[in-house]
Image (tube, rainbow, N blue to C red):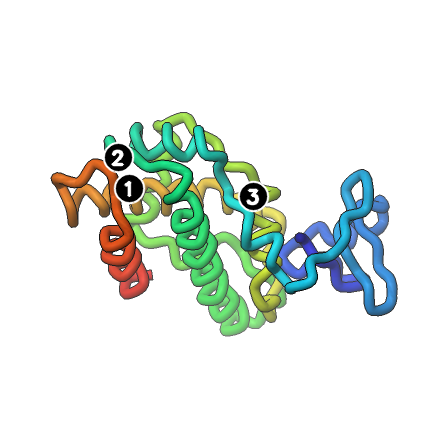
Amino acid sequence: MLLCQGKRGCPFSAWGAEALSRGLCESRPGNSRWRRGRERTTSSVPGEEARGMTVMGVSKFERFFRAAASLDVDKNDLKRYGDFVDAKLYDLLVVGQASAKANGRDTVEPWDLPITKGLQESIHRFRQLDEEVELKPILEQLAAHPPLDRTPTQETEERYPEIIGGLSVALAETFKILYPDVKNPQTSHWEGVTAVFDRLL
């Protein structure tokens, strides 16, 4: 669920103020929430609903990993994947806000994000796969994290889908590097691959 914070708008959205003015979200003392169409009630556990979401549906997830690395994944792997890309994107934003702060800015620009050469190449390969990642679920997942001290600009947010795509390609290809004979990754394989990313990103 994408939470809003008064006049400053959503904590991960540069266009939160505009959303307020257009009536897409509402601000009430002690009860601010995102609204799209009918009002949605908040979860009893903060962030529970957002963390249960993923940036890809099952069929797209399965197709993507087959195309990227000839891997057979299923809906049981989807939560691991969703948790991975959500955590890594947030890590990039945390480093990005440190860069923005060091440069005396209140906003996180695209160039603040620590996109390495390898990740940039993975983003390029993602584009070649002709797949799409929607922005809305990404923002909803990010809203479950502690708010950043610096607000990402709209231009930065618009890069999230491609960054998620690049992370997804890098993830799939790392499975093949570490476990070249594996077709259907198991828990131990996921743990091994994510441990590598935790040390590099």
Which residue is painted at 44% across and 58% down in the image?
A: 87
Foreground: disc 2 or disc 1: 2
Which residue matches tag 1?
A: 172
| Badge 2: residue crowd in 10 Å (few <14, some 14–19, many ≥20) | many
Mark 2 belongs to which amino acid?
A: Leu
- Disc 2 versus disc 1: distance between alpha carbons? 8 Å
Question: Which of marks 1 and 2 precedes in the sequence?
Answer: 2
Mark 1 belongs to which amino acid?
A: Ala
Q: Position of residue 184 (x, y in %)?
A: 24, 38
Q: Position of residue 118 (x, y in %)?
A: 27, 48
Q: Is residue 48 left or right of residue 9?
A: left
Foreground: disc 1 or disc 3: 1
Is residue 112 visible in this depiction of the protein? Answer: no
Q: Is residue 39 left or right of residue 72?
A: right
Question: Which of marks 2 and 3 precedes in the sequence?
Answer: 2
Mark 3 belongs to which amino acid?
A: Glu
- Disc 1 versus disc 3: distance between alpha carbons? 23 Å
Q: Are marks 2 and 1 in contact (CB under 8 Å)?
A: yes
Report the quarter where the C terminus lies. Answer: bottom left
Which residue matches tag 3?
A: 158
| Badge 3: residue crowd in 10 Å (few <14, some 14–19, many ≥20) | some
